[in-house]
Amino acid sequence: MADIIDGRRRADELLDRVTDETARLSAAGTTPGLAVVLVGEDPASQVYVASKSKKAKACGFHSVQHTLDADTSEADLLALIEALNADAAIHGILVQLPLPGHIDSGRVTQAVAPDKDVDGFHFVNVGKLATGETKTAFVPCTPAGSMLLLEGVRGADLSGLNAVVIGRSNIVGKPMASLLLAANATVTIAHSRTRELAAVARTADILVAAVGRPQMVARDWVKPGATVIDVGINRIAAPEKGPGKTRLVGDVAFDEVKDVAGAITPVPGGVGPMTIAMLMANTLTSAARAAGREPPAL
Ligand code: NAD
């Protein structure tokens, strides 16, 4: 039976550190400021944005939420981002994705000042991560949080270990692979065009699933003793809970894989809570940099 990696506990520890360090920085005259921008009324996005704003307040941040109508023009959204870029009280800007179809998400993402890009999506931060400048980059929150969970199991140096990342998105798969490489793992990125995916996955000492297909990774995909990080969040029908009910599952068939893996993240309660905690950590880091201070080690 695998160790179940407790993402909630690790996220709470990180948030406690962020809260302490925020109090210290605020006392020295700089309160971290996070602006969250939501366009439209997507229910899942509304939930994410509300919980990010709430966590920011709980950490002691100056927390601002901008909720814009679904028909807001791209020009108006870009003007808001320009204003936030210029606002000295704001150290992190997060634009909740997806944006409505008439807005070019790429243009909006690249409009955020790189030094306030706490999501790590700006080309400057992507380039820094890809070239190993992890000290000054903002690293996307989900892979950064996944690495902290992995570090708790395997330590910071992954020399000699094979890592397989399933999924090649810019938000999760690719940055995760960069971080694993920076930690000295031997990294394979698998995706929808990979042949013999199960056999590739079985080579992994560290298996990261970031696909969005419920319970795809089966028991026989996993090398005995492997560390399995399940990034996927999928809602499936749960008739056992009653008619019309649903539940969240990952990309890994948890119930069977837990018997073969060495350690595994659950869904929910694994990577998910780390994502939001890393957003707070990145905002604190940004505020410390803006104040000319060394960002606290978290
Ligand atoms: P995405 O759709 O952008 O990318 C999915 C990737 O999976 C693609 O690169 C694709 O090549 C690959 N893929 C698709 N079908 C495949 C198949 N059959 N076999 C192998 N690879 C396949 O998704 P994303 O934004 O990277 O998110 C992935 C999952 O992670 C989703 O379930 C999402 O909800 C979840 N997610 C969770 C968090 C969190 O906080 N825990 C954050 C971001 C995303």
Image (spheres, helix red, strand yellow):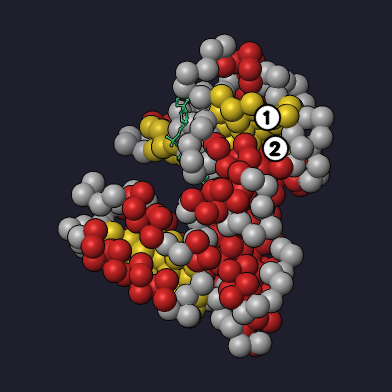
List x then y, in percent, for residue 255: 61, 28
Mark 1 sits near ligand 1, with its Cβ under 8 Å away:
no
Q: Residues within 10 Å of mark 1 (few under 14, many from 20)?
A: some
Q: Which residue is mark 2?
A: 181
23 lies above or below 80? below
Tell me residue 203's x, y (percent). Answer: 70, 19
- Residue at figure coordinates x 57%, y 16% from the top left: 197
User: Could you say which quadrant of the image residue 4 lies in?
Assistant: top right
From this viewpoint, which residue is outermost toward the left? 71
Secondary structure state at the residue bearing disc 2: helix
Q: Regarding mark 1 in the picture, which secondary structure is present there?
A: strand
> Label 2 neighbourhood size at 10 Å, few (<14), some (14-19), many (20+)?
some
Q: Quadrant of residue 28?
A: bottom right
Q: Residue at x 28, y 59 (%)?
A: 39
1 or 2: tag closer to the N-terminus: 2
> Where's residue 44, x and y in %?
36, 50
Label 1–label 2 contact, CB within 8 A? yes
Q: Amino acid at mark 1?
A: Val
Q: Please indicate, yes or no, whether residue 146 appears anywhere in the rendered image.
A: no
Please name the amino acid that badge 2 sits on.
Leu
**Residue 187 numbered mark, or none:** 1
